[in-house]
Amino acid sequence: MRRLLTVFIWLLCLLTAEGKVVKITLPDSTQMVYTSSELESIDIASDGMMTITTYEGEVIDSIDADLATIEISDEPAVRETTEMTMTYADADLIIGKKRDMVRMSILYPSTDPDGQLVTLSGVIYVPKDIWEGEKKSKGIMLVNHFTITGNSECPTEGYVKLESMLMTSTSQPDYILVESDFYGFGATRRFPQAYLFGGTNAQASIDMLRAARSILTSKRINYGRRLFNIGYSAGAYDAVATMRLARDKYADLVQIDHTMVGAGPMSMGKMMDMVIESDTTEYSVSLPMVIYSFNENGHLGLDYGKVFQGELAEKLPKWFEDKKYNSMDLCDSIDCDIPSRMFTQEFLDGKNGDLQKIRNLMEEFDQTKGWQPNPEDRVFYFHCPQDNIVPIECGKMFVAFLEDNGYTTSRLGWLFTNPDLDVGLMTTMETPLLEHMVGAVSFSKQVHAIIRAWDKRDEE
């Protein structure tokens, strides 16, 4: 009877765990933290011994079900805490300093592209001197990661370059960095990533910020007063969406001091038109990934055999689904920089209606139209004229849209040192001879200049 009761309790817990954090404490007090979507099965044998199997193939067996406990929670939870040394290396140049950090990988509640409850993952980086109370945090950098395709690139699996650019500069900013994996990576890696899918990643960022604040408070770490919302490339798009969502829905809870973005595909329709018209691209994975994201998360029902040519019709969706390769690996695998050889003619001609379905979502998700900016939301926008991946025309459209809606603009030089924090919009769009990837380095340096200006203001 007791055995049946144990099995019933475990099954009842799992049935109510959808979209929540599952904490399993073993008899030796070891605690494992999962999302419900990560657990494939929990089996209890007739002798009461339990076996846990995850979708990744991890098996934990020989657990006494009577002695183990399960907790289902809506609250964010720390999955792992590690100490590490962060370094900054980019373009074969060592820039900045090493930084000792405490890294917390967390799970937290949010919503998926359909608005349903889901548990996402993210990371909190706390400088060790702040963690140990030797310094005080001045605020939080809320970072929206740029384009990734491999799960090994996501924030909880390591750190991508932008984090190190921001945290290990020579100025050693006294800030805590908070970053979501976004839907489709980390805890939700089994599902299609929500790449540039409207406000999905914005919701993930806002929820990650709230979860991080809760966890830091529980650990008695004062996270400071300032909040900077940062993103480059695809992360720039998501950061603007985050700025919009914060004002529209969370104005009482989330007050962003400055949104700092660079080289964002703010108008995906314009970007796609330029790629198709020029029939060339230096980042062949980008448009196929947008189409895949829109089709899977928007439930468009596209037949990839009518979108992509030859083997790409089968391989591209599989590569995106598997998440084994980074974006440059996929560009090498695609081995084609001519869109007319990647996409079918019927798709490019729009004859079967599939292209229009993609255009409709691009129109709906466009950051250069269809919403009301508020000039009180401070924005810094960076874009290199020579950007070889995201055309600067996308940036110009975004800046013009803000100016048409009441923003006053301060146009800054490449190496500015005294940014005007009182204007709504600051831009740097004349940086010489930098392509997209290297532009991220210049962008991070300008972010530091703006943060130093805020620090100076707070010290006065």
Image (cartoon, rainbow, N blue to C red):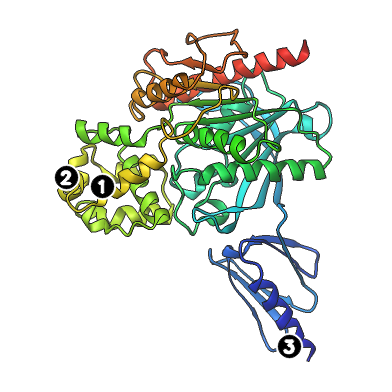
Q: Nearer the viewer, residue 373 or 367?
A: 373
Q: Is residue 454 above or below residue 166?
A: above
Task: Check disc 1 and report its element: helix, strand or loop.
Answer: helix
Task: Check disc 2 and report its element: helix, strand or loop.
Answer: helix
The residue indicated by pointer 3 is 4
Q: Nearer the viewer, residue 255 or 10?
A: 255
For marks 1 and 3 on the same chain, the one whose residue lies earlier in the sequence: 3
At horizontal 27% and vertical 56% (from top left) the residue drawn is 304
Q: Nearer the viewer, residue 192 or 173?
A: 192
* Residue 178 located left or right of residue 198: right
Q: Whole-Å distance between the Cαs marked 1 and 2?
A: 8 Å
Question: Label 2 sits on what residue type?
Answer: Asp
Q: Is residue 335 above or below residue 401?
A: below
The residue indicated by pointer 2 is 349
The residue indicated by pointer 1 is 355
- Cβ atoms under marks 1 and 2 closer than 8 Å: yes
Residue 403: % across, % down: 46, 18
For marks 2 and 3 on the same chain, the one whose residue lies earlier in the sequence: 3
Question: Label 1 sits on what residue type?
Answer: Leu
